[in-house]
Structures are given as C-alpha cells and as structure tokens.
Amino acid sequence: MSPHLGSPFRGPNYVPGPPPVEPQPSAPPPTFSVTPASAAPLAPPSPVAAAPQAGVTGPARGRRAGVVLGTLALSLVAGGVAGAVTGGWDGTSVDLPQAEAPAATGQQGSISAAAASVLPGVVSVRAGRATGSGFAIDAQGHVVTNAHVVEGASDVSLVLSNGRQVDADVLGVDANNDLAVLQVATADAEGLRALTLGRSAQLHVGDPVLAVGSPLGLEGTVTAGIVSAVDRQARFGDNNTRQSAIQTDAAINPGNSGGPLVNAAGQVVGVNTAIATLGSSRSGSIGIGFAIPVDRMTTIVKSLID
C-alpha cells in the first residue's frame, strides 16, 4: 500500500487509490511574435464586442515578423518608400529641441497632470482603411506617426483632440525605421499643441510611462506602465536591421501605432510601434510593447523635414 497524504486520518473502510501517475514532460514554453500596433478597419466594432487584430493596417499588409532573442520575435513590418517626400514644406530647417528629464521624482508631477498636458497634441490617424495614432512636434503642423500606418495611402486625415477632422499630407517616410512625418496646414492646426520631446537616453528601467493614442479607434486613450527595458534589440522597418527599442508594459493595442510614449513629466520619450503576441494569436496587449526611442526619432524626423 503506497502512502497517501493525510493517511493518519483514514477510517476503517479506507480503500487505497491507484498508484501515482508518472509526471509527463512539460510542454515547451509558448513563443512570441511581434506585430505593428496599428488598427484596421476605420469604423471599429463596439469595444465590448471587438476582437483586437494587431498589426492590421489594410489589405496590403501581409508580411510576417522575424524572430530574435530566442522565442521572442521582434520583427516589425513597415511600409512606404524610405525617404519619400511629398507635401508643401517650404524647405526651412526645423529645430526639434529636447528637454532634460526631471532631476527628482517630486518634480515629475502626477500621472493625470502628464496625461492632461499630452492629450491636446495627440491625433488619430486615418489612412485609407488603416487607423493609427500620431503627435505634433512643432508649431508648423508637423505630426509624427509610424510608416506602416500610412503605407500605400493616398488620402490621410487626422482627428484632433477637440474632435475636428483635418486633412494631412505625407511629407516624408523612412520605412527602414518605421517613421513618417505628416504635414497639417497651419490654418487647420488650431487646437493642436506641440508636445515636449524628452531624451530616451535618460530613461531607466522602472520609470513610469504613459502610452497615448487611439487603440481600436478610441481616441484619447491613456494607459500607464513602466519602462521594462531600455535597449531591447528588435528588427524595425523594411530592411529588417536590428535596432534598439524601449520595452514597456503600458498597454499598447491595435491603433496605438505612431502615438507617443511619454514620461511622468509629459515629455515624449518614444514612438509606440509594436506589441508582442503569443504564437499565432493576434489578441492585443499581453504587457509587452515596443517604442522607437525619441533620440533616434528626432534625428530621422529632422532629415525627413529638411
């Protein structure tokens, strides 16, 4: 008779059970894949009934992500032609100053104050059947988003925080780095506030951050989390080269692509670009999102505008 837990409490009619079953080998751990965090169809279903479809940016998108870091696939798909320039920019050089990070936690302010300062500069991007997010970077009507959001689109419009819808031109695209610059006419930019650009080099693991954008078409959505890693290697853009990314657990879902990742002082520290998903699932955020560091974004955006 093999021993059982609790055997001192057996009664007189105790009948031993079957012998213990040999443990079976554990199943292999699930694999991850990363897809662009753009939402598709322009009129999303009800948030209650919606099933997020990560990385859907229109019928033309069908490429799959590559695999890096063991089982974590960090390959991002971007669209457009690198360096392609359209629009009516007059050629004047643009300056994109970056602010220093707050020196002390007490100076960073509250999460609600940071969100309030950022929301007027964040837009919902509609490009054909694709939707995404973007944010203003200066007073000249320049808006940054992801290249894969506007890939192949001939008509692009923005929904501002005050609910106004305005047209935008694609001024420049760097598909290799998954970044694009849009141009809004100055007369149409009323109510659009340029956001303060921070420094991603000053980020630390554990710093609080906010992801702001339009997941599933829900404009002005704010999610909070922390910086999970500051130099996570990922494969961005059409050339599939390995680049550093900011990893965060702030919820990023389809439609967040191109929106800002900001610190607790309301400074932009990254451009939300992709989410990790389990295996073939495309169910949305599992707490692993990726953003292009603002230090790299600033350099690329300057070259696109100039």
Image: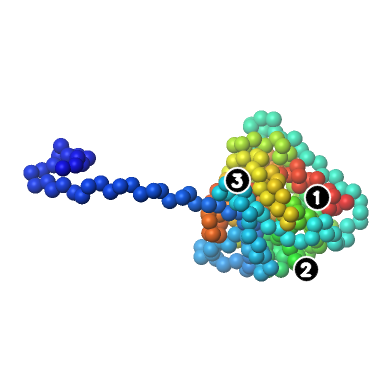
Q: Which residue is mark 3?
A: 69
Which percent across, then down, holds residue 200? Answer: 71, 40
At label 1, which amino acid type do we have?
Val
Q: Quadrant of residue 179?
A: bottom right
The residue singled out by tag 2 in the image is: 154
Residue plotted at (81% across, 62% down): 169
- Determine if residue 122 is in view: no
- Badge 1 crowding class, 10 Å Cα cut-off, few under 14, some 14 to 19, many 20 or more, is many
Which residue is at the front of the view, 302 or 50?
302
| Amino acid type, label 2 | Ser
- The alpha-carbon separation of the residues under discs 2 and 3 comes to 36 Å
Tell me the element at label 2. Answer: loop
Report the disc number at residue 301: 1
Q: Of all residues shown, which one is farthest toward the top?
A: 104
Q: Mark 1 or mark 2, which is nearer the start of the sequence?
A: 2
Secondary structure, mark 1, is helix
